[in-house]
Amino acid sequence: MFFEGRRNRGFTLIELLVVIAIISILAMILLPALSRARAQGRSVSCVNNLRQLYLANTMYASENNGYYVPAASDMYDFLLPGSEPDHFGGRCRWHGKRDTPNPDTPFDFRKGPLFEYVPEGRIKECPEFFEYRSLGEVPNAFESGSGGYGYNMAYVGSMLSVENDPVKACKSGMHERMIENPSETIMFADSGMPQNGYIVEYSFVEPPLMVSVNYPRGQEGVYMSPSLHFRHWGRVNVLWCDGHITSERLEWATEENVYGAVNRAWNVGWFGPKNNYYFDWKKRVALEEDK
């Protein structure tokens, strides 16, 4: 007797198309989840970077009679008699020092005030801030070296809100005991400054309202260019003066900044009330109409 062997049956075209469709659907479901998981990992690294900045600033304060590191100690030195004609207050920052006031000169962190307090002797860059343009690539990248983080200069990194002499006010940060509610006062946060078609590092986080000697709590109706950068899936990592870190969602922004960039298009803006409450060391009740 002869027995016919069983034939191996191949896939039909329709079956192959069904398999391909299923794989495509699974990819559509899984890839965003994987992207989000990677983004969350980068956000965790960013939080660790901010925590290092907090430890560095508090260690600096403990060795400097309780005063936090100045954000830009020479910001107003151009007002001094005999100052350099091209000096624009750009030699010294919390994240380093440069040899000339030329904005194309890089900051050297090793010469900066926080060098001895930061592990590995450098500020680690936020891993989510990969889209920024650095010094030498574009004009106005004058704050390169801050790692994509900004310091609350107006109220923590200077004494501009209490000292009438701006030159003297910038030589020191605020005293830690002056901050009335550290858990509601920003110290550092993700930052960036949009330019014309690109974004650069910016070493300060600006409050909504402009701060001056005459308006220490902020001048109503005079808005700053926002620099809080909501780059973690529409959220910004914020380090507060008591050391805790939160993730905040973009709530509002002015239309354009000083460079003509559309703020929301670059995910820069503010959260909270339309005043300086979360920046100001001196607390006041946030008005309902400001929320």
Image (cartoon, rainbow, N blue to C red):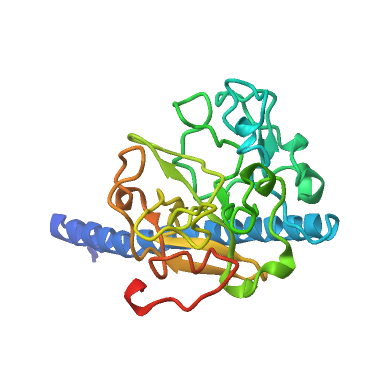
Tell me if residue 90 can be seen. Answer: no
Which of the two residues, 3 or 84, is positioned nearer the viewer here?
Answer: 84
Tell me where residue 163 appears, x and y as whole percent: 64, 54
Which of the two residues, 201 or 10, is positioned nearer the viewer here?
Answer: 201
The part of the image, by quadrant, that contains residue 20 is: bottom left
Looking at the figure, which quarter contains the N terminus? bottom left
Looking at the figure, which quarter contains the C terminus? bottom left
Tell me where residue 188 appears, x and y as whole percent: 59, 57
Q: Is residue 63 left or right of residue 25?
A: right
Tell me where residue 139 appears, x and y as whole percent: 44, 26
Q: Tell me which residue sits at (69%, 54%) in the image.
A: 173
Up-down relation of residue 282 to residue 147 (above or below): below
Which of the two residues, 211 or 240, is positioned nearer the viewer here?
Answer: 211
Which of the two residues, 193 or 168, is positioned nearer the viewer here?
Answer: 168
Q: Is residue 185 left or right of residue 261?
A: right
Tell me where residue 251 appears, x and y as whole percent: 35, 66
Q: Tell me which residue sits at (41%, 51%) in the image.
A: 224
Q: Tell me which residue sits at (29%, 60%) in the image.
A: 28
Up-down relation of residue 240 to residue 90 (above or below): below
The part of the image, by quadrant, that contains residue 100 is: top right
The residue most toward the left is: 14
Q: Is residue 224 left or right of residue 64?
A: left
Q: Tell me which residue sits at (39%, 77%) in the image.
A: 287
Tell me if residue 210 can be seen. Answer: yes
